Image (cartoon, rainbow, N blue to C red):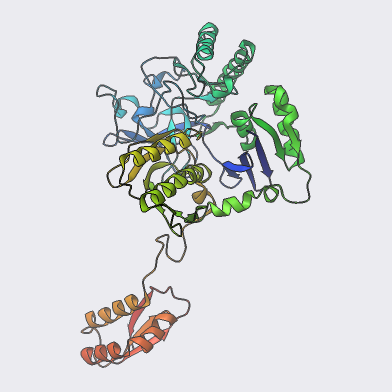
Amino acid sequence: MSSEILINVRPVETRVAYLENGVLTDLTIDRKTSPTLVGSIHRGKVIRVLPGMQAAFVDIGLDRAAFLYVGDVRGDIDTESGEIFAEDTAEASGFDEPEESAPAASSSTEVKSLDRPRIQELLSEGQTILVQVAKDPLGSKGARITTHISLPGRHVVFMPTLNHQGVSRRIEDPNERERLRQLVQKLSPKGGVIVRTAGEGATDASIKADLDYLHRLWEEVHRNYEKKKTPGLVHAELDVELRALRDMLSEEISRVLIDDPESHRKVVAFLGQFMPKYKNKVKLYTGTRPLFDQYEIDLEISRSMERKVWLKSGGYIVIDEAEALVVIDVNTGRYVGKKDLEDTIVKTNLEAVREIAHQLRIRNCGGIIIIDFIDMEKEAHREKVMLAIKEELQKDRARTTVFSMSNLGLVEMTRKRIRPSLVKTLCEPCSYCDGRGYIKQKATVAHEIFRDLERDAHKGDQRAAAVVHCHADVGDWIYEEESEMLEYVENKIGRNVVLKLEPGYHVEQYEIFTM
């Protein structure tokens, strides 16, 4: 399988695309105006402790306070020494690949242990703490943070506040897994270590060098934390292009194309220091056609921002992204099949599975995801679809959990969400409908005007005319379609009604005055 990484660099944004056999399978967009904060380490100040939510709001130097849940607070937080302790668990937020026995952060609706210390016992208002951003701010919510620091390297993730040791689940060879475990134990790191997928086949010297670098980085973070006296950034993650190569570059990648000379020099220098064997895979793209146009990436991005995505057979899926979940509906569309109805449904569902997994990766959809497959009568067909979706999701770098299909043909799943989705990154709510996706019909607004006229008929001088300021389309609708109703209201309230058309008004906006 031939894979490529394309890096498109411009002064205002950097885009990184990962292609497998010419097909876009992963996309990262980082804009200078709203860069991702995930992985950055801050000096924070607790500004409010909420016992009822078992959480705290922490000032980390951003516009909005960050959210810290009790499950993400270290038990020895008051020492500020970074000592290792076994009883706590945390999420290694510096990476998103599944790990064996990987520590997982508690959700905001679940307390893992009844005897866990309460938030008011761990934190107090005004206290300063060292925290790391686990999730970017989403919508009206501030960043999600943790006191369990994780520092990702090329081969390992170092967690200085834990003593957990593990190996990526994606390393399947039992002999290699055992070798890596023994190697980590032999090195006796002063902290927790998880060997990443990229660590498969790595030499003892490579992993030791990785750990030594991360140890030095942790010491630097601590020095910066002690020097800083106000809430704010202590350590920033690598630039998006370097971060992408650190996490994705492997033997499977045939080449890396970069279309900016300065970024090309920076990447080559980075690889020469940390990943020298991949240095020759990096090429500067000098074609006259834009890099993403050459590989039709922009076309794929536009397709992934549409609500409806067509399948090759003629069926289609509809993806609706809400605040708390993503809903996907599968339809046969123009596909009529060849054999019978059940066969048509199964083939549509199986084709939809591949496209859904593909779209989830490109769109970076996260949180709760509900998939409404077309109902299948046979249990064997249901199992076939479930097996297909689990196989497709194994290719996803983000952690996913899939539950069995319900009797209604619904599949519930979760996908780890760290940064905003593609739609949230590139789009904003419609300013006209305020993100609802619909506006009131002209007839509906007209009827609201009539009801308000009747409701306020007794107010003011009964001899004065009522002047209605409204959008021109609504006024035209009343004159053309609701003239009978207008006459009825005038007779009932005993006043003349005058419509003053306001082209600048929103179609749902109107005001009633007495003249």
Q: Is residue 386 left or right of residue 431?
A: left
Left or right, residue 154 beside residue 467: right
Q: Is residue 165 above or below residue 449?
A: above
Q: Position of residue 299 (x, y in %)?
A: 61, 53
Q: Position of residue 101 (x, y in %)?
A: 41, 20
Residue that appears at 40% across and 35% down: 387
Q: Looking at the rendering, in which quadrant would you find the C terminus?
A: bottom left
Q: Nearer the viewer, residue 457 or 328?
A: 328
Say which quarter of the image contains residue 51.
top left
Q: Is residue 490 above or below residue 22?
A: below
Toward the front, the furthest residue is 339
Front residue of 411 and 226: 411
Q: Is residue 402 left or right of residue 22?
A: left
Relative vertical location of residue 211 with respect to residue 140 in this rendering, above or below: above
Residue appearing at x 47%, y 46% in the figure? 351
Residue 428, horizontal then vertical, whole percent:
49, 56
Total marks placed: 0
Residue drawn 59% across the image and 30% down it: 247
Nearer to us in this view, 152 or 304: 304
Locate the N terminus by quadrant: top right
- State the residue at coordinates (29%, 76%): 448
Whether residue 139 appears in this view of the structure is no
Whether residue 68 can be seen here:
yes
Q: Residue 405: which quarter of the image?
A: top left
